[in-house]
Image (cartoon, helix red, strand yellow):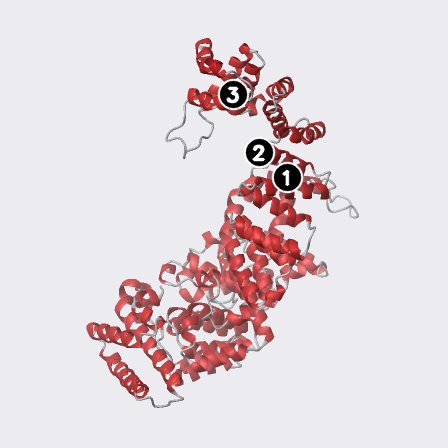
Amino acid sequence: MNINRLSGHRIDHIKKNHFYHFLEDLAKEIREAGLTELEYDLSGIATTYDALIDYFKQGVADPERDRVYLQLVGHALQLSDRCTLAVHRTKEMPYYTSQSKTVRRESLHTYRLQLEVFAEGTRSLTGSEEMQQLATTHDKQLSSLFTDLWTQGTWDAATAAEADALLLSPTITRADQCTVVSAVTLSLLRMFDPSKLLFLCDAYYHPETMVSIRALVGIVICCYCWGDRIGYYSEAKARLELLSEDPMFGDQVCEVILQFIRSTDTEEVDRKMREEIIPELMKNPKLRRMPNINKEEPNADDINPDWEQWMHESGLEESMREITEWQMEGVDVNMSTFSQLKRYPFFYTISNWFRPFDAWQADMLGIIGTPGTGNVIADTILQSAYMCDSDKYSFCYAIREIPQAQREAMMSQLDEQNRALKESADMPDLKRISKQTTQSILRQYVQNLYRFFKLFTNAQEFDNPFNHVVLGVMRSNPLYPLVVEPDCLFKLIGLNIKLKRYLRAVECFIRLEGHHPERMEATQLQQFGLCYQKMKMYDDAIEAYTKADLMKPDSYWTIHHLAQCHRAIGNYGKALEYYETAETMKPDNLSLTYHVSELLYELGEYEEALPRLHKLDYHHPEALKSLRLLAECSFMDEQGAQATKYYERMMAEHTDELTATDWRHAAYNYWLQGQRDDCFRCMARAEELHASEPYDEEQYAAPPTFADTVYSDSRLLESLGARKDELAYLYDAYYRTNK
């Protein structure tokens, strides 16, 4: 739940620099809520601000004025958040309220000692009962610590020091430290606290990559959610500026944002997996039986020669290739598989959604056995880089439901796969999937977060950070200078175009053009224009394409897209120029030939269109589109006999594909040739199809009748030589004949 929204218009006063109004509104709400513990702090802020304003009125030079003002606003905002939580949490955040009331509050020092005892126990205990008891106790302690950290208010100096000691302890396990970092991140998402942001900045330099990556993601989330507040806290602002000077930090921030953007495609991938790929494969009868694999001869090939052909014909090869490509790109392909497996009691505890996969979790000990003993399932899951931690837990709980015999068979298959992966360790793609790289750790963690904010029972109480990060970076965000670096913008542009998020790509282009105009080369201008074109903003697209054409003349791609845009806005003359230029570049491209013919038709230059249409008909006589245009141009050019030939070909070869307009124009052509019976036969077929033909809703309030349509064609027929006095009888003659 966004605390700014709950604070109402009070936050708007800060944005407008109306600090007195903010203090007055806050004081009123504190009084009405009876929050006496906040009144003293607020009165101190008000007194100090009064003195600052008095000095300002007297014209006293005060070099510390701005610094003091920022401190006062920052402190007041924290009081405002505490007030908002106290007033609204019971109604708006019942889950948070219940958890904060029931959690066992311990000092972070006490929690640190407990986690260190657990870590020592994992290295010394050997008995299964002792290990199970140790793991069970640790699960409760870790859950309590997580909830304590998540529901805490702002830290004082002593609490911040104890949190740092948790982070720096050489004994505590990596998994526990990761969970601590996630708890602080979740707490920051609820309410901003500069001390917690500083904690994450320290955690970013942790020697364990998993801890560092989680801290990095927390920093990005905090900056996107609270970017407009961080500037009021000088130490936090200075620390972020120092971090931003590290080139690696800038690169990693960009990767975090890219991974958050990739998450926006998860629902589409999920839909495609459920509705297209899996049903398509399952309905294929060949998937119900595997092809025979001949292993009778010791030296024979393991794979049947028909295997590859079966893979190709069944569609499995293409689907598996697509899934593999998604995995390589960091797309989440497991959401549909595991979303239904988040109903185990394990997922009722909030901390478990953020806990790295840990074989020392009590249930996991019973399912996959003691860590480090060569257990096939444990080793396979722990080493997997394409399943996030949340899904690994789901997978293990699903295994528990499988009968022992099937579980042993699965373990045997996993063992074989492990050996195959080791034997193929030199294959780059397998390395990328199986190796735990920094990028794969980041991907898994973001997928963990995505599942929590989508699937957790009480997720509606949390302000979803994906909404903030994906929407784009604001100038108030401390990370803004990093995001507008050209290399980062290029990556963001490429991914947004790939995901068809053209508006976001345009925003990135505008930033690139504003901050680094020298990097807007022809390629970037082409992409810029394409994004506008996809959004149907054709004038803007033409402007971008024209700049690209000036920078890199004679580019077929640019000229072709300029032609498309001019045509889209009805500028047929200009579109024709560009299409003809493109046609000279690629004279064998019959698609261009067709488009030129269409434009000539639109411009009424039927005679000029006919040679191109004859060429198209020669190469592709089976194509209805070019045949239809050939008949229309012949008809409009008053070449009746030729038009009759083509209309009759259409009736013979494409009768079920013809529209009411096709039949009606064929009828008119017969009328002009004096073939009345053929005319009325075609009109009858046109009337049958008339109801399904679209009409101009701006011109007609209701679909016009067939008689209305024939009457409206009178001008066309008159222009083609029909006698005006005959046209008045055309429909009646047809109607009487048909009746």
Asked whether the beta carbons under mark 1 and mark 2 sit within 8 Å of each other, the answer is no
Give the Cα distance between marks 3 and 2: 19 Å
Query: Left or right: where does residue 330 sit relative to residue 80?
Result: right
| Residue 499 drawn above or below residue 647 | below
Give the Cα distance between marks 1 and 3: 58 Å
Q: Which mark is residue 314?
A: 1
User: In percent of the image, x 61 and y 26: which residue is there?
Assistant: 633
Asked whether the beta carbons under mark 1 and mark 3 sit within 8 Å of each other, the answer is no
Residue 527 in view in this figure: yes
Which of the two discs, 1 and 3, labels the residue nearer the N terminus? Answer: 1
- Image coordinates for residue 537, horizontal then vertical, percent: 51, 49
| Residue 56 drawn above or below residue 677 | below
- State which quarter of the image contains the C terminus: top left
Choose between 203 and 46: the one closer to the eye: 46
Three-letter amino acid code at disc 2? Glu
Camera-nearest label, 1 or 2:
2
Which of the two discs, 1 and 2, labels the residue nearer the N terminus? Answer: 1
Crowd rating for badge 2 (residues with CA inside 10 Å; few <14, some 14–19, many 20+): few
Query: Where does label 2 land, which residue?
Result: 602
Three-letter amino acid code at disc 1? Ser
Choose between 407 and 524: the one closer to the eye: 524
- State which quarter of the image contains the N terminus: bottom left
Camera-nearest label, 3 or 2:
3
Choose between 109 and 450: the one closer to the eye: 450
- Image coordinates for residue 120, horizontal then vertical, percent: 51, 79
- Image coordinates for residue 304, horizontal then vertical, percent: 73, 42
Give the Cα distance between marks 1 and 2: 45 Å
